[in-house]
Amino acid sequence: MAIIKKFRIKSFKSTNNIIEFRNVSLSYGNRLILDNISFEINEGQIFGMLGPNGVGKSTIFNLITGLIAPKNGTILINGYETKSFPIYLRTKKFKVGYVPQYGGYFNDLTLHENLKAISEIIITNKNLRPERVNYVISKFELDNLKEIKAKHLSGGQKRKLVLALALLSEPKVLLLDEPFAALDVLTIKMLQEIIVNLQQEHRITICICDHQARDLLACVDVAMILSNCKIVAKDTPSNLVKNIHAQNAYFGDSFRIN
């Protein structure tokens, strides 16, 4: 954890809420997923979500992006109630980027073709597209992979491509769905440093959900534990692992972060 923490710069972080859930509930049929949950994500924060499978972590991402609507409650982004904003307007107005766990790119296009195709959709000024594409290629050190088809990239290279695609729109909020899944230790460390640098250099608010608890806690400012449709604990990583409710619901009593 200390290896990642040394990259952290916290002085610019504000206490302004960029995302807020107020008494949000959601059900799929008769199955309750979220039960009257409330939490905030502050501007410039790296925020983590942990919990068992099916507890509602990806559902929260879908609620933020507008793929689904809550049964009850209110979701605010930058102080605006989001119910009246469809997906495309929500993305454009609030500059929300999303990196899915799987896919997010065109398999049979090269890395450069992927970036060019998405830039044509999201960057209105066609004169700015090459500049932005070249910027993210340089940012993620992808120059030597430009002409390789996405389907032939390694797992870590695909994650970098999808992050680069998300950054083309210069998001203010970035949602990362299980970014560390099925990756080797060195690739995870590389992604952790990229995430922290995005916060440090661009002041992007980042929300991560993952099952790799140690890897997630190594690069977040605050994390929350979801269990049985509720938020059982929310705190800094060092405090969270000591929280008895978090231990009972998720960590157990032998979990350590370093």
Image (cartoon, rainbow, N blue to C red):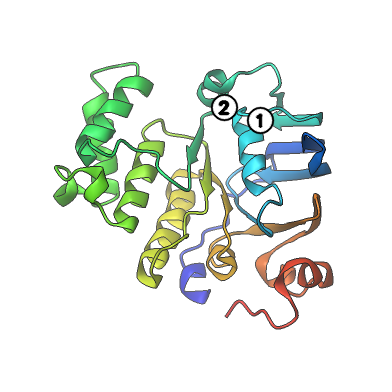
The quadrant in which the C terminus is found is bottom right
When asked about the image quadrant of residue 93, the answer is top right
Q: What residue appears at the point 66 percent right and 31 percent down from the top-left corner?
A: 77
| Residue displayed at 68% across by 72% down | 238
Q: Could you tell me residue 45's position as x and y percent? A: 60, 50
- Of helix, strand and loop, which one carries label 1? loop
Residue ID at (26%, 17%): 126
Q: Amino acid at mark 2?
A: Phe
How far apart are labels 1 and 2 at the CA level? 7 Å
Q: Quadrant of residue 84?
A: top right
Q: Which of 71 and 196 lies nearest the eye of the viewer? A: 71
The correct choice, above or below, for 142 with respect to 6 in the image is above
Q: Can you identify the residue that label 1 sits on?
A: 78
Q: Secondary structure at mark 2?
A: helix
The residue positioned farthest toward the front in the image shown: 30
Tell me if label 1 and label 2 are in contact, CB under 8 Å. yes
Give the residue type at disc 1.
Asn
Left or right relative to 7: residue 58: right
The residue lying at 28 percent from left, 39 percent from top is 107
Find disc 2 in the rendering and name its residue.
94
Say whether residue 244 is left or right of residue 63. right
